[in-house]
Image: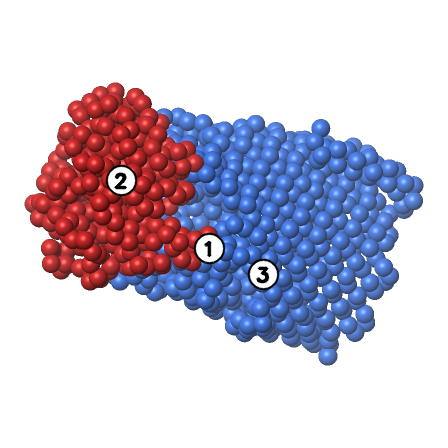
Chain colours: A blue, B red
Amino acid sequence: MNLFKIGLFVCLFLYAFLGYAQVRVDSVKQLSPIEVSSSRLTKFSSGNKTETLDSTLLNRYSARNLADLLSNESQVFIKSYGLGSLATTSFRGAGASHTAVLWNGFNLQSPMNGLLDMSLVPVNFLNEVKLQYGGAGALWGSGAVGGTIHLNNSATFNKGISVMANTSLGSFSDKQEQVSIEISKKRIISSVKLFDHDAKNNFPFINTAQYGKPEQKQSNAELKQYGFLQENYFKINLRQKINTRFWYQHSDRNIPPSMTQNVNVSNQKDESFRVTTEWERKGEKLQSIFRSAYFDENLLYSDSLINLRSKSRTNVFITEAENRFSITKFDLINIGINNTYSRANTKDYTSDPKQNRTAVFASYKIHSTKNTWNSVLSARQEFINNKAVPFTTSLGLEGQLLKYFVVKANAAQHYRIPTFNDLYWAQGGNPDLKPEKGWSEEASLIHKHAYKAFSWELGATVFNRNIDNWIIWLPNEYGIWTPENVLKVWSRGTEYKLKLNYLLGNFKVQLSGMYNYVLSTNQKSTTVNDASLNKQLIYVPVQNGQGNATISYKGTSLSYTQIYTGYRYTLSDNTEYLKPYTIGNLSIAQLFSLKTSKIKVYATLNNIWQEAYQVIAYYAMPLLNYQVGLTFYFNQPNGNTGL
Amino acid sequence: MKTKQIIYLSTLALAITFTSCKKDKPDAPVSTTTSAATYDNGVFITNEGPFGSGTGTVSFYSRSSSTVVNDIFQSKNSYPLGNVVQSMSVFNGKGYIVVNNSGKIEVVDAGSFASGGVINGLTNPRYFLGITNDKGYVSEWGAGGVAGAIEVIDLNTKTITSSIATGKGAEGMVKSGNNVYIACSGGNDNDSVVTVINATTNAIVKTINVGTNPKSIQVDANGKVWVLCIGQWNGSYSALVKTGKLVRINTTADTVDLSLPFASTSSQPSNLVINSTKTSLYYSYNGKVYAHSSTASTLNSTAIINRNFYGFGIDPTNDYFYGTDAGDYVSKGKVLRYNTTGVVVDSFTVGVIPGNFCFK
């Protein structure tokens, strides 16, 4: 019995006791609005395309990670090195570090490499995922270049006890357990979410990169992960609220070889401690929010084959204060300050870097009486170790047109500061790097309508984005690899979305489709006769699309998703590419309703057309694989069963 | 009216969608991957391939037709070479292609490039040297990149018959007389020796201290062995604590009879090659290429080519200098050819990160 299991037992016991007390006290339940932390996203982003992956959808993916969710349900391209392996995002043809990932408003991007591994975020820890496309540097600061992923937690007061417990089994010895327990009283909510994931990931594949094309089993791909998220929400009085969160996670993964390698014995261990708190006071004239976070992230990468044992640790302290008020009834103003202090410790740097960043930001929103039209002007000035980085602004506009249409337009500046690796890597780190910066513009037209049992939504977006001073690593005249601000990348494209719902009594049909066309090209030569000039960036598909059909009747639901990913170049001169692939995933669920509880039985079949594909060149992906599971719900709010 | 507008705008949106679906399929690669009948009178170029994943390739430049054919291994054998193609040697009509990260040597017919088997079980192999019709040596960094060794290969069965432990990071090899001299580059650590092995008995004859991290090695017309030591960085990689050295070994006594240190504490010398008469050595240093006469006792202060190359070689048929340019390291690289006076003759596109040459 490991520490985690003891912890799980203690938590369950504690909650069972508290729950017993709860049942007696809260015999009368009443609905109250959901207490979502008042992010700037809802109030001060205007004109950007956004997508919401709500709790119903998240519940369908509760035994999966964020990379799975986004690659199946969004227009974000997920670059995955394989089952359970590193997965990063690309919004609109930007790089992996050009996505700001905000957990309840706090940026989770590593100061060392600017990334967050999406495969390390369990979906059952989240209540809502919002995707904000386009640059939003004035709102979110460094990294909000291609887009921003908002990972949100929320809870509702006065709901009593609710429990979710899930267990699932999958192909390649995949075993998972998730448990969520929430106790919600009039003025206090306390919840805990836990997960435990073990997998061998030893899937068979045909190794086309070896002599004789043998069938092989993926080796060195085992993973073991567990973690918990503990949250507390307090209503101090009618005006004041406070919440705290603690997210602990441990991940131990072996790194499988690529198809052209014969062996890989490397291993990666990630351990993170994330603590946050948020206080909010909503006065009649002034709303004040104060939030702070402390992240402690540890990574140990070892490869005995090359005698490598690389240990690193980062600490990030974030403090943010915001004040909101209106002058007239047509406007809303936000003024805030953010301080982010980061430090890292690794043998790969000459000394332990420390970075103190302070940003002042402000937004001015003007809106019509019925809030059908609004426009937001935002600005941000950040100082890194007292040195100013480019002043960043954005202007957005959105509003209703002809009753059934919404138009959106946004122009924004964005920037990304160099990572610690770029600045301080022991050999080649370049402390003189400038931030990457540029402009992005977009316009959307959305049509929404409902007619009898039908409702539908159509959306089209065009965007344009420039990134200057894009940092890449190249050897200098002495052959030493060093990063420089060299590339200039121009991305532009169109995105389409279509949703159709049919609802008649207990019978529900949902159809949706998405399609992207993205050109992302390098506009500047890095070398003489640079063959990458005007060519598409590597691993950015020009086209991708997906379609989903979900049918549900009473407690039964059937869902099919098909994803198409177009050609992706693997060389910057576009002379080599990976073939497109189409993946089909099918999931079936049956919900049994008891008196106060529900039981869901589900099965998911992934890659049902047995497509042999590669997301990254020579990294094998599994053919048909399944996941079956059983979920128990006690007193879950409607719609939270994923059906 | 409203319905009309909806239909109109929806149709418009769909129309944009379909018109924007222009041709998606990329153009076929321009490289001439038609497999030539035989690869004679030319130069094999080993291209390491993209970092991390992916495969290296071999290109062939024909001297007679002045044309280049890329990725000749895969086009002949229908599977890729593997991760990080380090070097290639031709011995007794067979090509031995050392694939570093895949831990193997692909053996091919040097004329047709048809696969003739694989030597597996190597750990970080670097170079192949043919000894007899039945025996070859492979230098390797070994486990952890520190357990340097020479793997003795039975060329008939393509298996490892024995292993000779050397200094750390066994790298360049050269045969002088009946002895093989192995530069022990330190691998993932540091070392400073040349291990000498008797090619008949496979026994270590001597271990010679030469200077920090000897990497490339050549033998001159007098049978003397030249070693280029690349030096060693300090802990923060800001300066060399041990600068590079060009060292000559007298193979009669197996002792160092000349040691020429480089002055720079910021640039490591690299890539030692020798011309056809084995009287003139070439190496890169400070972003330039320098020549060194095998009879000179001081280093040249003027470069012969004022640029840096990722790898280079000397064509023994005409003493042309072949240098590689890996560009941005994620696209096809180039080979530039220079005549004996250091003037560019021509250049051609090869594979990703061209690193080594094998002149046939």
Q: Chain of mark 1?
A: B
Q: Residues within 10 Å of mark 1 (few under 14, many from 20)?
A: some
Q: Nearer the viewer, residue A379 or A629?
A: A379
Distance Cα–Cα, label 3 vs label 1 = 17 Å
Residue B275 seen: yes
Residue at 82% in and 63% down: A240
- Answer with left or right where residue A374 lies relative to residue B195: right
Q: Residues within 10 Å of mark 2 (few under 14, many from 20)?
A: many
Q: Nearer the viewer, residue A407 or B200?
A: B200
Q: Look at the numbered discs 2 and 3 and tell me whether their residues touch, using CB distance below 8 Å.
A: no
Distance Cα–Cα, label 2 vs label 1 = 27 Å
Residue at 32% in and 27% down: B164
Residue A441 seen: no
Q: Residue most toward the right?
A: A24
- The image quadrant that residue B201 belongs to is top left
| Residue beneath disc 3 | A354
Query: In the picture, which quadrant includes the C terminus of chain A?
Result: top right
Q: What amino acid is at disc 2?
A: Gly
| Residue beneath disc 2 | B172
The answer to whether marks 2 and 3 sit on the same chain is: no
Rendered location of residue A364, percent (x, y)? 64, 75
The answer to whether marks 3 and 1 sit on the same chain is: no
- Answer with left or right where residue A53 lies relative to residue B111: right
Q: Nearer the viewer, residue A323 or A544?
A: A323
- Answer with left or right where residue B311 lies relative to residue A51: left
Rendered location of residue A214, percent (x, y)? 36, 26
Residue at 65% in and 65% down: A339
Provide the secondary structure element on which disc 3 rests. strand
| Residue beneath disc 1 | B236
Q: What amino acid is at disc 1?
A: Ser
